[in-house]
Image (cartoon, rainbow, N blue to C red):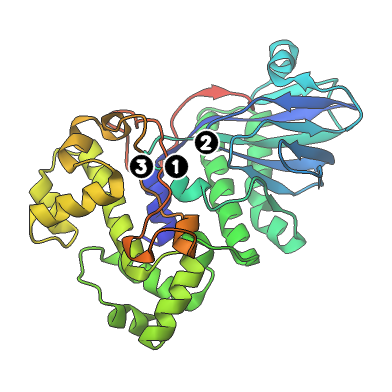
Amino acid sequence: MDPLSDVLSLLKPRSYVSGGFDVGGGLSVQFARHEGIKCYAVVSGEGWLSVEGVPDAVRLTTGDCFLLPHGRPFRLATDLTAPPIDALTILATARRNGGVVSINGGGDCFIAGGHFALSGDHAGVLLGVLPPIVHIRNESDKAAIRWSLDRMRQELREPQPGGFLVAQYLAYMMLVQALRLHLAEGRGGVGWLFALADKQMSAAINAMHDDPAHRWTLQELAERAGMSRSTFALKFKETVGASPMEYLTRWRMLLAGDRLTNSSDPISVIALSLGYESESAFSTAFKRVMGCSPRQYGRGRGADSRSEGEASADLSPSPRLRGEGRGEGRGDWPLRNSPSPSSGASRHLLPASGEKGLS
């Protein structure tokens, strides 16, 4: 798989809510803080999006798609001057038509999408490199998701057998497409996701993801990127926020953590599959990156094995990796506490069943 698919597979996103709002008249709806990612698109009409901590409201027009990856409270409005009404209050009293909640008769603004829970143990791998709002608004980009929008509108408004599952998959397509388009915009930033937009850096990252067990050297990766070793090392650090070897080690440990949590493979087998000839060397690297030994991690099913002061690794660079503090040789990264994944979670990109409606 490609790196973005690899990361999404690791995080196991599940669309447990998919549906739409059809609003009529001037209205402002307030949504509380949430976990995971919300991915919405404006099927028809116009409105406004206001997110806590973002100074200006964002104008939304037909075809716009947006992601809310940080879980901040937000407001959707057709009239910013209208007093906000809590979303739960609206949902409790509004009329429903299949997967669509109709408010004030609808007709002025129709927004559809999904809410994705990240059941993997390392949500920061993806969420940490995204801004508070990912807004897709270019006309050429809108065309790329128009088919998904039209199909979702039909599935939500004209319920058919299996329609809820189809709507979930369409929401999933919108999520991946929005991430692709955000990546293609090339607005810059530091992190693995932004590096994928650079052909040279992407070639090296793809090589590491394709064969994480290989004994990659800086020279080999530089050759994959078509660069000299010194130039490659400098550009990789500037683009990703970590050295190539630091990135490779952390990706290996994320894969190891997933297998310790979701498989019965012994540590020795996992170590060998990730390029470590001895269990001891693997355990040392794992503890340095993940904050606990592999046995503790597996016994505690991931995050549960760590104390409140410990946390999980991700692929996001910390200020220390940009020269602010401790030496770069240690490769210290921000480690975030995150909820333990549910037992037996699938490794595939399959949405789980859940309730209808947008929340």
Q: In terms of depth relative to the viewer, which is nearer, 92 or 248?
A: 248
Q: In terms of depth relative to the viewer, which is nearer, 215 or 183?
A: 215
Residue 123 marker: 1
User: Quarter holding the C terminus?
Assistant: top right
Q: Residue lying furthest front in this view?
A: 325
Question: Would you say the residues marked 2 and 3 are in contact, meaning their CB atoms lie under 8 Å apart?
Answer: no
Q: Position of residue 182 (x, y in %)?
A: 62, 58
Which amino acid is tagged 3? Ser
Q: Position of residue 278 (x, y in %)?
A: 7, 57
Residue 244 visible here: yes
Residue 209 visible here: no
- Left or right of 221 in this view: 112: right
CA gap, disc 2 to disc 1?
A: 8 Å
Residue ID for mark 3: 312
Residue 60 location, quadrant: top right
Q: Position of residue 271 (x, y in %)?
A: 14, 54
CA gap, disc 2 to disc 3?
A: 16 Å
Residue ID for mark 2: 36
Which amino acid is tagged 1? Ala
Q: In terms of depth relative to the viewer, which is nearer, 19 or 253?
A: 253
- Left or right of 232 in this view: 161: right
Q: Which of disc 1 and disc 2 is earlier in sequence?
A: 2
Residue at position x 52%, y 27% in the image:
161
Q: Which of disc 3 and disc 2 is earlier in sequence?
A: 2
Per the image, label 3 sits on a secondary structure element best described as loop
- From the viewer's perspective, is residue 224 above or below residue 158? below
CA gap, disc 3 to disc 1?
A: 10 Å
